[in-house]
Each structure stands twice: as C-alpha cells, then as structure tokens.
Image (cartoon, grey):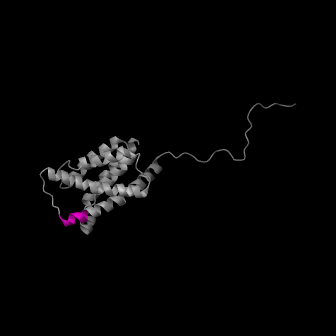
Amino acid sequence: MNALSTIFILAIAYVAVFLEAHVGFVRNALGVQIDLLPALMVFAALTSDIITVIALAIIGGLLFDSLSLNPLGVSILPLFLIGVVIHRQRELLMREHFFAQMIMGVVASVLHPLMTLFLLMNGGNVPLIGWKSLWQLFVLAWAGGIATPLFFKIFARVQYALSYQPRTDVPFRADREIKRGRTTLNS
C-alpha cells in the first residue's frame, strides 16, 4: 500500500475516536461506548504493511486513551498484538470474504477490551466489572463485526475513486485486419 492509504487509515482512526467520544446517543441508548479501532486494525492488518499497523496501534491507542478514562498508552499493546497477529497470518486468512471479515472483526472487538482489562488489572487499577460488562462485550462484538466489512467497502470505493483504472476496450475496431510483412507493388 502507498502512503496515501496509510494517511486515510489514520484519518479514519482520528474520526472514529472523535465520534466515539462525542456522539452520546449511541452510548445512552445501548449503554456501551462502541469502539471502532479493532475493526479498523483488522482492515489495516489485512491490507497494509506493518508500518501502518504499528502507526495505527500507537496513534489510535493514544487518541483513544486521551479521550477516555484509561491510563495513557494502555490501549496500544492490545491493538498492536491484534494487528501483528493478523498481519503475520494474512496469507492464510480469507480476507475477501464478508463472513471472514465479520468474524475477524468480532474476535478483535472482543479481545481488545479483554486485553485492556487484563493490563488495567495488572497495573493496579480496579475497573468496574459486573453483569453489565457481558452486555457491553456483546454489543462491542457485534459493532466490530458489522464495522469491519464496512471498512473494506469504504476503502475499496476510495481506492477505486483515487487510483488509475486501466482501459478495458481496445482502440482498434474488431473487424480491422492488419497485414504484416512486405508488400510488393505489381506494376
């Protein structure tokens, strides 16, 4: 991938974190702050290079932690691990299939908060965990499962709009005959 796609991925990460923090009606209706960074990480790991995965983990994690109650930097390691594992196995994964994209988004969206919770608890923090946490994990899983194929569709349209499309038609007529070789003049 080129630098333009990396810039688009990081810009979408910025917009996603901003919307997560400032759009309150979803959080008020469902009781969950939806996290789109794991779904974006799945897309980046399957379609980009390792530098983009690392940049998304660092920048996305810092952006997310700066607008939440998490200690700064705690989201970087879970995003990085998800991205590196998927990136290293991307030749074996069926990245073009809708169902596979959805399952990878669900798994990443479940693993990200669980790994973050593990890091928080080992860091001496006491997060609130209860029965509502299962509902939040369920909603996060479905949101990540729906968002991952959407990222694939959005970025495919952006790439189609901004990249060179080769011509499929030939400039010659189909019934045109081209004779090759020497021609002799009979006089």
Q: Quadrant of residue 21?
A: bottom left
Q: Is residue 150 visible?
A: no
Give the percent coordinates (x, y) of residue 172: 67, 44
Q: Quadrant of residue 147?
A: bottom left
| Mark count | 0
Give the percent coordinates (x, y) of residue 165: 52, 47
The residue at 17%/61% (across/down) is 129
Task: Work out which quarter of the rendered image holds the N terminus and state it.
Answer: top left
Task: Work out which quarter of the rendered image holds the C terminus and state it.
Answer: top right
Membership of 48 in magenta stretch: no
Determine the residue located farthest toward the front in the rendered image: 92
For the stretch drawn in magenta, the main secondary structure is helix
Residue 7 lies, with reference to residue 140, above or below; the image says above
Membership of 131 in magenta stretch: yes
**24 or 65, nearer to the observer:** 65
Q: Is residue 115 visible?
A: yes
The residue at 27%/54% (across/down) is 111
Give the percent coordinates (x, y) of residue 20: 27, 58
Does 168 sit left or right of 84 as displayed? right
The residue at 28%/47% (across/down) is 81
**101 or 64, nearer to the observer:** 101
Residue 42 lies, with reference to residue 131, above or below; the image says above
Q: What residue range appears in magenta? A: 130-136
Give the percent coordinates (x, y) of residue 44: 36, 48
Does 153 sit left or right of 133 as displayed? right
Determine the residue located farthest toward the bottom in the rendered image: 29
